[in-house]
Amino acid sequence: MDSAAQNFQPRTFSIKLWPPSESTRLMLVERMTKNLSTESIFSRKYGLLGKEEAHENAKRIEQLCFVAADEDFKKEPDGDGSSAVQLYARETSKMMLEVLKKGPRVTAESEVPVADTPLVPGDTVLDISGGKRAFIEADEAKELLSPLTKPGNSYKRICFSNRSFGVDAANVAGSILESVKNQLTEVDISDFVAGRPEDEALDVLRIFSKALEGCVLRYLNISDNALGEKGVRAFSELLKSQDNLEELYVMNDGISEDAAKALSELIPSTEKLKVLHFHNNMTGDEGAVYVAEMVKRSPNLESFRCSATRIGSDGGVALSEALGTCTHLKKLDLRDNLFGVDAGIALSKTLPKLPDLVELYLSDLNLENKGTLAIVNALKLSAPQLEVLELAGNEINAKAAPGIAECLTAMQSLKKLTLAENELKDAGAVIIAKSLEDGHTNLKELDVSTNMFQRAGARCFARAVANKPGFVQLNINGNFISDEGIDEVKDILKAGKNSLDVLGSLDENEPEGEPDDGDEDDGDEDAKDDNVEDGLDSKLQNVQVEQDDEP
């Protein structure tokens, strides 16, 4: 063996998780913004933050936690950064909880609430959802629920989410709940049988159903329990006794056609219902018919969410027609279904019947130009008050741009517009950008990422937002903007009233790309960087509010 071979050392790679890329930091800010501005047990107790305030707090929290984690990393620069990532995630969770406990700022102009949920003193809420998800046994259940056994207690709201009850623990809970059920108005038993065998889980559901039968509830959350039809029918006694529900959450519950039918049959009245959320189920067209029946019987709905439910054209048409009875609707979320053009046209005929609509989420519905134009033409005349419009991922191209632009010109209250993952190219981008340039003083977020446009489109979108007061984020990532075009965008933003801080990440922009170019395979080094980024993302993707034990 020669000396060179003897001295050969295999090449090693050191993958570092710190520092995170700009895109990962932005991802965390967006995730925190969503957590801070989404209804939860905390928002019902302390108040719901508006999206702008949530975003401001999220940016502040991320910056503070990044600095702290970076200082930690500098102490061990030869490490892989995992301890810094853990500190980063842990501290963001703690600080989110602090922000939620402070509640929203008191301002002259508050966001429109989707439901009338008055704030009440803390001792009316018993929340045992804090800490890590865990199985609980009878003794622990007795201890956790002991506040409900105290004479003269005033608990009206309970949250048992994130704790998995077995039969023994359920029997303890059942007897305690029966003693206070006449005073309960809000019950959150989402995600409370996780990891249990099906037979045991169904027994637990029946025990709780029997114990809570006859409660006069305004709020019920039974999400994240993998119910299916068996689970829905296990809740029969509870559901059959509900005549006054104002909010019902049945998300991520395996709601198939039969389960949707059972739910529609069991709840005797939905006339007072203001919030109905069905997100992430396997409802399909057949199940959508039964959901539509519930919607028809809910004339006071203010917030309806039926996203990611596998509903196609026929179900989309049925649902769209049923929504015509919900004339008080403020928020409509139908994202991530398979509606297609016909359902889009059916929805366009319903939209003029919804004069109070404030937020409309229609991304990833396969609307194409025809369905999209039908909808924006309806909105142009009937919804000038709209504040949020999402139409991402609908195969919209430049031919639809003039119609969209006319609609946007009429929507001077718009705060957020999302047209990402379409095919606008420069021709469509210029037209839409110019419709936003004048007025639109309330616009805070504009997402036109992944639309195949180049330098011209990017410049126009920058000009459109450069001088809008309070503007928060412009997302033009994933396009084909040259380096010169990026410099021009930055110059335009610098010259305006807003700083460069409003410009989102450009890590997926392709300066050398052309609108008709195919995807190129990345090299090994890019693949390695992606793996590192994926590893960091996986550590941060579940960052949530860290719940502490409250009295």
Image (cartoon, rainbow, N blue to C red):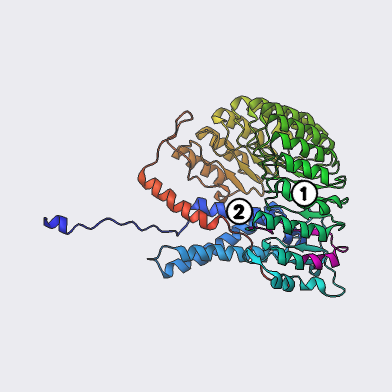
Tell me which segment is drawn in magenta: 173-194
- Residue 195, how many percent across, how many down? 62, 58
Residue 180 highlighted magenta (yes or no) = yes
Q: Secondary structure at mark 2?
A: helix
Q: Nearer the viewer, residue 504 or 500?
A: 504
Residue that mark 2 sits on = 31
- Residue 211, how many percent across, how many down? 82, 61
- Residue 290, how many percent across, how many down? 78, 38
Relative placement, left or right, of 327 versus 441 is right
- Residue 196, located in which quarter of the rendered image? bottom right
Q: In the orientation shown, which residue stands out farthest toward the left?
A: 2
- Residue 408, how many percent across, how many down? 70, 34
Q: Secondary structure at mark 1?
A: helix
The residue under the point 81% across, 55% down is 219
Relative placement, left or right, of 338 versus 83 is right
Residue 394 highlighted magenta (yes or no) = no
Determine the CA span between mark 1 and mark 2: 35 Å
- Which quarter of the rendering shows the N terminus? bottom left
Residue that mark 1 sits on = 233
Q: Is residue 66 above or below residue 349?
A: below
Q: Amino acid at mark 2?
A: Arg
Q: Nearer the viewer, residue 271 or 422?
A: 271
Q: Is residue 443 above or below residue 48?
A: above
Q: Is residue 62 above or below residue 461?
A: below
